[in-house]
Image (tube, rainbow, N blue to C red):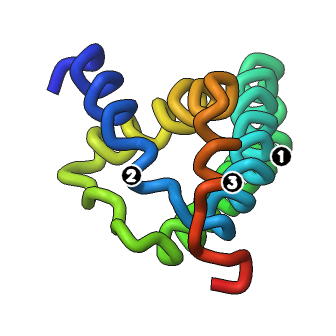
Amino acid sequence: MPFNELIEWQWKGYSRFHQSKKNLLIHIIFVPCFLLGFASFVFSLLSLDLIAVLMSVLLMAVSFGLQGLGHSKEANPAEPFTSFKNAMSRILLEQLYTFPKFVVTGNWYRAFVASKQGIGA
């Protein structure tokens, strides 16, 4: 799927897969952690700091793993990845573009308020 179609596809279904209060809270905390890890990864690569590169990858992996746990609380499970390239494209797109757009447009707040699934769910 071309990248512009992936952007449109991910945005079109995003609200459907982000309705649980617990998942929304996990995302609002751990997407910024992923972004911090990603920025640190880029700067660590540029400065050739292997320890910082590894720590950055660990931060991104933990952040993404916790978001995956949040997705397990959703009534609508996420679409499965079809390949490694598909997984990397979708993960980076969600973290760097789609979720920030979801927050900035007010959709995160609307989904949080509208959620019928409590935080303990």
Tell whether 121 sits left or right of 51. left
- Circle 1 residues within 10 Å: few <14, some 14–19, many ≥20: few
The amino acid beneath tag 3 is Val
Rendered image quadrant of residue 80: bottom left
Q: Residue at x 50, y 37 (%)?
A: 94
SS type, badge 2 = helix
Count residues near mark 3 (Cα–Cα under 10 Å), then give few for <14, some for 14-19, many for 20+: few
Mark found first going from the N terminus, 2 or 1: 2
Secondary structure beneath dot 3 equals helix
Say what secondary structure mark 1 lies in. helix
Check disc 1 and give the amino acid type.
Answer: Ile
Label for residue 51?
A: 1
Q: Mark 1 vs mark 3: which is more N-terminal?
A: 1
Distance from disc 1 to disc 3, alpha carbons, whole Å, reads 41 Å
Name which of mark 2 and mark 3 comes first in the sequence.
Answer: 2
For badge 2, the amino acid type reads Arg
Q: x, y percentage for residue 92?
A: 50, 35
Marks 2 and 1 sit apart, C-alpha to C-alpha, by 38 Å
Residue depicted at 75% across the width and 17% down the height: 46
Q: Which residue is mark 2?
A: 16
As rendered, which of 10 and 114 lies closer to the eye?
Answer: 114
